Amino acid sequence: MQFLLAFTVAGPLIGAVAALLPAPPGLKGKSPDQAVLRHGVTVTGVVLVAALALALSFDHDQPSRMQATTDISWIPALDVRIHLGVDGISLPLLVLTALLTFLCALYSYFKPPAGPSPKGFVALLLVLESGTLATFAVLDLMLFFLAFETVLIPMYFLIARWGGEGRQPAAWKFILFTLLGSVVMLLGLLLVGLKAGTFDMVALATDNGRGLSASLQVIAVLAIGIGLAVKTPMWPLHSWLPDAHTAAPTVGSVLLAGVLLKMGTYGFVRIVLPVAPEGMHVFAPYLAAFAVAGIVYGSLACLALARPGAKGDLKRLIAYSSVGHMGFVLLGIASMTPTGVNGALFANIAHGLITGLLFFLVGAIKDRYGTADLDTLAGATGAALYGRAPRLGGLLAFGAVASLGLPGLAGFWGEMLAMFGAFQPAEGLSRPAFLTYTAVACFGTLLTAAYLLVVVRRVCMGAKPAADSPPLADVQGYEFAAWTPLAALTVLAGLWPAVLLGLTDPAVQQLLAGGKP
């Protein structure tokens, strides 16, 4: 298991270096571009197999115990160690990252993004995967920061070089927002590590803040929380997200929504909650207030984009929906209860599956129509996807109802448990305040249903197209291969939530108890 985890994290980095080397003559196929794209599929496929093998080898009877651990001294003067491990909290995120990256590489093999040579694209995709996997696997604060930052550069170039209209301003906005947040976060991580005498996340979680004064915890939570909130993204630090999603290539949007946003919320659960509980108690009501503000704001922004005549971009609408959905995740974390935190972790995975599928679908619609503008797509009588491309229209409707939290699909459980956690928050938190937040979040679910149903009505329904209308391709074979796993897992997680909750709950219980079983 140690080897599997180390290979899962380092394998994509080795693959990225190999992607930049000339392909051997016998492996070039029809062209060097095809060879390097095939290389991306192969490497991400092998990493996915390793992640699945790790999941199968994982001791599911002890999900709260760190497994597959590697602990090697790296910088002795600062006691910084190459410390890797996986438990019930990080394992689902590792598998989700490996799956989404493989599906993106597979999709790109058949539909390469417009831009420079695929060689750089594949190398950046693999570096991005390695950094994200490392973020979920490392157990040292400094390594966590390095992995957290590693992801920013490849995503910047994916947007700036392979993105669409407005890609340069969007890429700059993305990198500036996230880097500024990361600088503040680094100060908080250094403060915690130097004052506690260790950067080891397991030791810090076990200590549960007992070695840190209350005032220091408050400062640390503020500093670390700002950096994590930018990446999440929490309202009002979200403004980089819609531009980045709108300009990014399809696979960039899938990975940005599917795994990169999870790095912020994972940091709250793995670092802030167990390491500085007193500081988190101080800021939890404010975090919950920002969370529900984001839920309502994101939904209202989507409603404004979806109305006729607004010239709303469908990719931008899905991006704003992420602000609302991640608000539910933050609300669950802010409750500081096992129910709420489990709901947040479940919602993380559900959002990655559902929004990843939606961005794949929107990219396909944009490829077919040449635009993602809702007014253009709807036209006078509706785009009538049900009539022109029934499988594509059906999948878009499926993704929409999963995103609005229909019971029986993955989107339901996370949001429900997050609101349950807020309904009865942890001891010491104001219950009247959290009851108010829960009521606002419930209202947000109604707004979410409203804008998603408007999108389905405008894009999927409408009069039958004229006989002389140009044909519209339905779901292709490679699209079916890339999208089916996400749809199937959305149903599986909705019908059998114990698969995830059985992993996360013991680990969350121990984390909130200060590392005590």
Image (tube, rainbow, N blue to C red):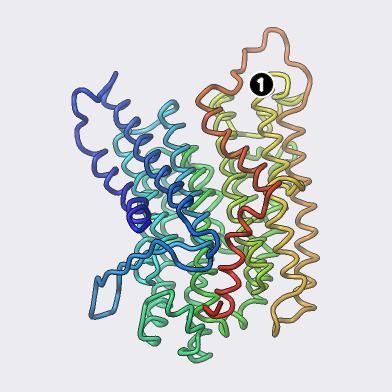
Mark 1: few, some, or many residues within 10 Å (few <14, many ≥20)?
some
Q: Secondary structure at mark 1?
A: loop
Give the x, y percent position of residue 210. 50, 89
Give the x, y percent position of residue 285. 67, 77
Residue in the foreground of this view, choosing between 78 and 67: 67
Residue in the foreground of this view, choosing between 477 and 511: 511
162 on left or right of 409 = left
Q: Residue at x 66, y 21 (%)?
A: 389
Considering the image in quadrants, where does the N terminus appear?
A: bottom left
> Quadrant of the rendered structure where residue 459 is?
top right
Question: What count of labels does the image hold?
Answer: 1
Give the x, y percent position of residue 231. 50, 60
Residue in the foreground of this view, choosing between 388 and 19: 19
- Residue 99 against residue 112 in the figure, above or below: below
> Quadrant of the rendered structure where residue 161 is?
top left
498 on left or right of 229 = right
Q: Say which residue label 1 marks.
A: 389
Give the x, y percent position of residue 268. 53, 69
Q: Residue at x 33, y 46 (%)?
A: 12
- Residue 202 against residue 153 in the figure, above or below: below
Considering the image in quadrants, where does the C terminus appear?
A: bottom right
- Residue 69 against residue 475 in the figure, above or below: below
Q: What's the amino acid at mark 1?
A: Ala
Residue in the foreground of this view, choosing between 401 and 102: 102
- Residue 228 against residue 44 in the figure, above or below: below
Q: Residue at x 49, y 67 (%)?
A: 267
> Quadrant of the rendered structure where residue 425 is?
bottom right
Q: Residue at x 45, y 27 (%)?
A: 111
